[in-house]
Image (cartoon, rainbow, N blue to C red):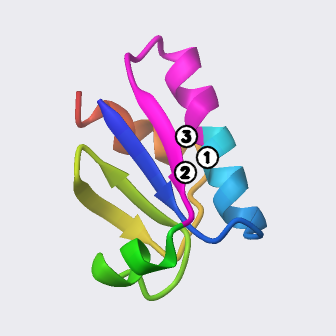
Amino acid sequence: MKITVYGPSGCSNCTQLKETTEAVVDRNDIDADVTKDTDMTKLAAKGIMSTPGFEIDDEMVFSGSTPAADELEEIITERL
């Protein structure tokens, strides 16, 4: 599984989402590569109007929000 968080480097919500995602992946022993992409050109190309953007396996799942850890866990595990 490949998970990408999109947002500018100075975005605290984006950084928090990446950290929470890594914790969920570790806690559930999920084989996933979690990265953060700060390239604003990619954000625009993917239609992300507000950050953070959240993508699993090249499918944009949501943008503009930072879900709680339990909600994020549900989002990730339902795609296993």
Q: Which mark is residue 36?
A: 2
Other residues around mark 2 within 10 Å, as few (<14) / some (14–19) / many (≥20): many
> Decide: marks 3, 1 in contact (CB < 8 A)?
no
* N-term-proximal mark, 3 vs 1: 1
Q: Please tell me which residue is depicted at 42% across the width and 58% down the height of the picture.
A: 54
Pick the front one: 77 or 37: 37
Q: CA distance from mark 2 to mark 1?
A: 7 Å
Left-right relation of 27 to 53: right
Residue type at tag 3: Asp
Q: Which mark is residue 18?
A: 1
In which image quadrant can residue 60 be found? Answer: bottom left
* N-term-proximal mark, 2 vs 1: 1
Secondary structure at badge 2 equals strand
Is 55 placed above or below 77 here?
Answer: below
Q: In the rendering, at what x and y percent does residue 29 appear?
A: 47, 11
Task: Please state which of the two labelled residues, at mark 3 or mark 1, is closer to the viewer.
Answer: 1
- Location of the N terminus by quadrant is top left
Pick the front one: 54 or 24: 54
Residue on which the image places disc 3: 70
Residue type at tag 1: Lys
Residue stretch in magenta = 21-38
Q: Is residue 37 magenta?
A: yes
Q: Please tell me which residue is depicted at 38% across the width and 84% down the height of the picture.
A: 44
Other residues around mark 3 within 10 Å, as few (<14) / some (14–19) / many (≥20): few
Residue type at tag 2: Lys
- Location of the C terminus by quadrant is top left
Is 17 placed above or below 44 here?
Answer: above
Left-right relation of 51 to 44: right
Is 48 placed above or below 21 here?
Answer: below
Q: Residue furthest bottom?
A: 49
Q: Is residue 9 magenta?
A: no
